[in-house]
Amino acid sequence: MNADDRVPQGKYVVPALAQGLAVLALFSRQRASITAPEIAQELGLPRSTVFRLLHTLQLMGFVQKQGDERHFKLGPAVLSHGFEYLASLDIVEAAQPILQRLRDETGLSAHMAVRDGREIVYVARYPARTTISSTVNIGTRFPVHATVMGRMMICNLTDEQLQDLFPSDPLPRFSDQTPTTLAELKKILVEDERRGYAVSQSFFERGVSSVAAPVRDGAGRIVAAINITAVDAYVDLEAMHGALKDTILAASAQITRWIRREETRGEPAVGAEPPSTQKRRKSSEPVHV
């Protein structure tokens, strides 16, 4: 990706705003800190401009300096606004009590993710009550094609939509099971859609087993996915395709009913706790997911 891709151009684009957001977009889980010269080089901006951008973002709490005074990292304002955004999502709010119950019933970590292009983004998390549990955090991103939740969110896309999403081979490999061509991925997706859920044993990461199911809106479109995950623990395939599959499908159906209820303003799903009855979080409180 070149500088022009990172900083959009156009008649109605506000350059300073676009540049500031481009600076924030450089940070990632794999790249927690970055220097001003690196930002200037990657975005193709003068160092004086980068200095002013960083100074403004630092004053607003979006970035902060590290101990060496050269490297910058994301500040607490990003976290605060990110949690506020997640708290505003009806789908996350509706899913929380259902995911918590899913975790308690299975003893496994429960998660929800949405799709952002070729990546999934974790938006809710209930870790297992054990010493070994899923370590993913809210905001963690993983590749769509290499994860079962990702596959759940694209299993009903048309061939044309899949070609637009993955215009060229090979696809990045993360394990021996990762499909590296679109043709291989399509074969897996056909089976995922037919089955209505997906099962993984070390599909993305060694030692991690997972069962995933899609969440749909009122029009039947897949808008999210949920899963249950076991880390460093053998889970029998028969159980994954049996009781665990039944449990997660029931949970995804319950969330789907809530979405449809919100869209049609019908009656609440039986047995689900209305999101409106939950105590809303204060912006200073951590999101318990």
Image (spheres, rainbow, N blue to C red):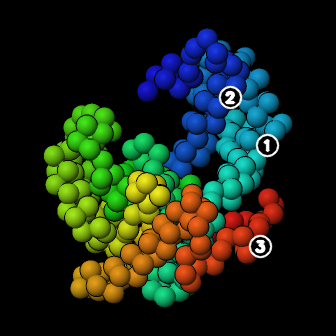
Residue of label 2: 20
The amino acid at mark 2 is Gly
Element type at mark 3: loop
Distance between mark 1 and mark 3 Cα atoms:
27 Å
Q: Which mark is residue 61?
A: 1
Question: What residue do we see at 43% from left, 54% from top?
Answer: 219
In the displayed image of the protein, which residue is found farthest to the right?
Answer: 59
Q: Nearer the viewer, residue 225 or 56?
A: 225
Which quarter of the rendering shows the C terminus? Answer: bottom right
| x then y, percent, for residue 58 | 79, 37
Look at the numbered disc 2 and give the secondary structure of its residue.
helix
Query: Amino acid type of disc 3?
Result: Lys
Which residue sits at x=57%, y=22%? 7
Residue in front for this viewpoint, 39 or 258:
258
Residue 67 rendering spot, x and y as whole percentages: 74, 46
What residue is shown with label 3? Answer: 279
| Outermost residue, top side | 11
Tag in front: 1 or 3: 3
Type of amino acid under label 1: Gly
Q: Earlier in the sequence, mark 1 or mark 3?
A: 1
